[in-house]
Image (cartoon, grey):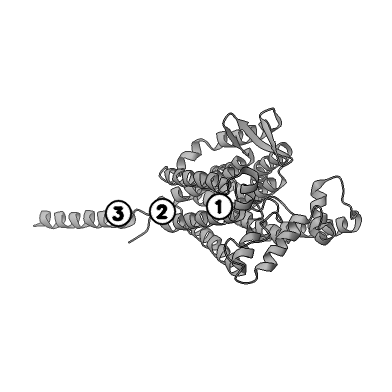
Amino acid sequence: MSNTKSQKQSYRTSAGRSNTRRKTRADYYDYSLVAVIVLLTCFGLIMLYSTSSYTAELKYGDDMFFFKKQALISVACIIMALVISKINYRILNRFATILYVAAVVLMMLVKTPLGQSANGAQRWLNLGPIQFQPAEIAKIAVIVCLPYMIVHMGKKVKTLKGCMVLGGAGAFLALIAYVFTDNLSTAIIIFCITAGLIFVAHPDIKIFLIIAGVVIVLGVIGVLFLNATLSVDGSGSFRLRRIMVWLHPEDFADTWGYQTIQALYAIGSGGFFGRGLGNSIQKLGSVPEAQNDMIFSIICEELGIFGGLIVLMLYAYLLYRLFFIAQNAPDMFGSLMVSGIFIHIALQVILNIAVVVNLMPNTGVTLPFISYGGTSVLFLMAEMGLALSVARQIKFEE
């Protein structure tokens, strides 16, 4: 009898353990994140065709020139993201250092004969049939390498020396991006991702508030100084000219501030519900390269403020899904990596829209998943694949 009772108890215990194991091993895939990515991409393709068809017809004799290239790249990149999502993200621990070094080397190659100029800036790398901006790789490098360093540093990350090491690693990538690709906006994004990840790993609000306060004060002083000292006819530096255009766009309406003024006209003429899809007037040459970083102005002209708010809501939901994954990630490496992706997407959306409405100087930052650009879509989708890979490792109790 005692043996029978012990066998029953053992069976119940093992059954309970297997039942608990079954409940906590539920497979999870973030279809909501996939859905919002696909929705943003499809919306971006519709707006890209509406925005670029006139220009494409004039330049290339094909109104679908930009649309076909972007659609092909987008479909391929979504498939790539789904493939990446099936790979265990922890494998990146083995290649974090290699990725960092590769990003530095590729950005340095821009200054060699392999570099290629476009729109007055040498930021592209030409490797046979492949052309891309290596600065985009630096964004993924900092998103992967800093979490790797934070995990391996352990408690040291909360020391001043640890924060300086992390800050130095991110700042070095930002410096290389600025010096070798002449891309200040990417350098700023890399540095902000670095600061954000350090804050997530070491959330001492007082220190970061002090730093943020000092930066804001210095920024305001710098803007006031430039406003008081720079001449109206601009200066030799195109970045200083951009600041002058930002401060006094009406003074440069026929020259450097033309794009900004026309973008504001587009937003203002759209009203609340817009002129209607395809009925933009400003896209007919008034807003140069409207399919790139100024596409949000055409969205507001055709779909109105209402359409612009819908786009912002889609981005808000995308960021919510990334936040959810970061909060429930099975380990710190995955959580920090998705946090870095969150910071990157949020920064690009904020910077792009701030430029379009003239809240800050022109930076050339694209609107994620909507602006034209194969390199941008490629690396953004790679980041989404990594986020989905982390999400697949989440376990919930049923």
Q: Residues within 10 Å of mark 2 (few under 14, many from 20)?
A: many
Q: Earlier in the sequence, mark 1 or mark 3?
A: 3
Q: Earlier in the sequence, mark 1 or mark 2?
A: 1
Q: Amino acid at mark 2?
A: Ile
Q: Is residue 178 left or right of residue 75?
A: right
User: Relative to 319, is 165 above or below?
Assistant: above
Which quarter of the rendered picture does the N terminus lie within? Answer: bottom left
Which residue is at a point 56% across and 53% down the rendered structure image?
49
Element assignment for label 2: loop
Q: Percent from the top left, x then y, of residue 15?
A: 22, 56
Q: Could you tell me how far apart the alpha carbons at marks 1 and 3 are, in whole angstroms?
A: 39 Å
Inspect this view and state whether residue 150 appears: no
> According to the image, label 3 marks what residue?
21
The label nearer to you, 1 versus 3, is 1
Inspect this view and state whether residue 258 appears: yes
Q: Earlier in the sequence, mark 2 or mark 3?
A: 3
> According to the image, label 1 marks what residue?
369
Q: Is residue 162 left or right of residue 362?
A: left
Q: Percent from the top left, x then y, of residue 241?
A: 82, 51
Element assignment for label 3: helix
> According to the image, label 2 marks what residue?
394
Q: Is residue 372 left or right of residue 354?
A: left
User: Relative to 174, is 277 above or below?
Assistant: below
Q: Amino acid at mark 1?
A: Phe
Which residue is at a point 64% across and 60% down the rendered structure image?
298
Q: Amino acid at mark 3?
A: Arg
Instruction: Mark 2 and mark 3 in contact? Answer it, CB < 8 Å.
Output: no
Q: Percent from the top left, x then y, of residue 338?
A: 52, 51
Q: Nearer the viewer, residue 239 or 51?
A: 51
